[in-house]
Amino acid sequence: MSNTHAPGKKATTAISRPKPIRWGGTVFFKVCTKAERSQVEEIVFEAPRYRFTEHSEVFENMFHLPTGSDGDVEGRDEEHPIMLDGYKANDFSALMKVLYPEPHIMVSGSYGLSKEEWVGVLALSTAE
């Protein structure tokens, strides 16, 4: 902070704002409850990829795969999401709550997830 003062004027304080944090890109997932990927059941999630890469060698390696000649790499944009077939969108949403908790959750120490949501989180986090 710096003080500025001109004769005859009140002193003001300039507040310097922190620079935004950049997490190294986002990743897109499309969760399909049924393997045939019916449009009604598809939901696209966008999330910062850092939590996936810091806790999973599978995702870490996936994001370092070379791009093909067409340049379409899964997860890089909404048109080419990573497809997660056979999972429930509610389960993936619960996983997002655990990986990226809101500030009030971090303060309270409770995720407030139901037993069913925790089962979904465990199913996704232990899937191979």
Image (cartoon, rainbow, N blue to C red):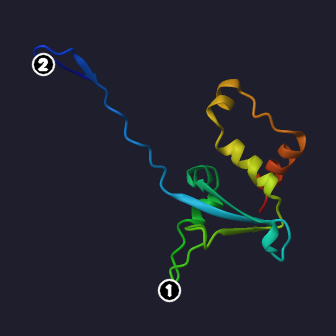
Q: Which residue is mark 1?
A: 69
Could you tell me which residue is drawn at 49 percent across and 50 percent down?
Answer: 23
What's the amino acid at mark 2?
Ala
Q: Which residue is mark 2?
A: 6
* Label 2: how many Cα within 10 Å (few below 14, some 14–19, many 20+): few
Q: Which x, y percent locates residue 70?
A: 52, 85
Q: Is residue 35 above or below residue 3?
A: below
Could you tell me which residue is drawn at 86 percent across and 70 percent down?
Answer: 34
Disc 1 and disc 2: Cα gap in Å?
A: 62 Å
Image quadrant holding the C terminus, namely bottom right
Q: Which mark is residue 95?
A: none
Q: How many marks?
A: 2
Residue 49 is left or right of residue 119, and the answer is: left
Give the secondary structure at mark 1: loop
Could you tell me which residue is drawn at 84 percent across and 50 percent down?
Answer: 120
Q: Which x, y percent locates residue 109?
A: 71, 27
Name the one closer to the observer, 5 or 123.
5
Could you tell me which residue is drawn at 84 percent across and 67 percent down?
Answer: 86
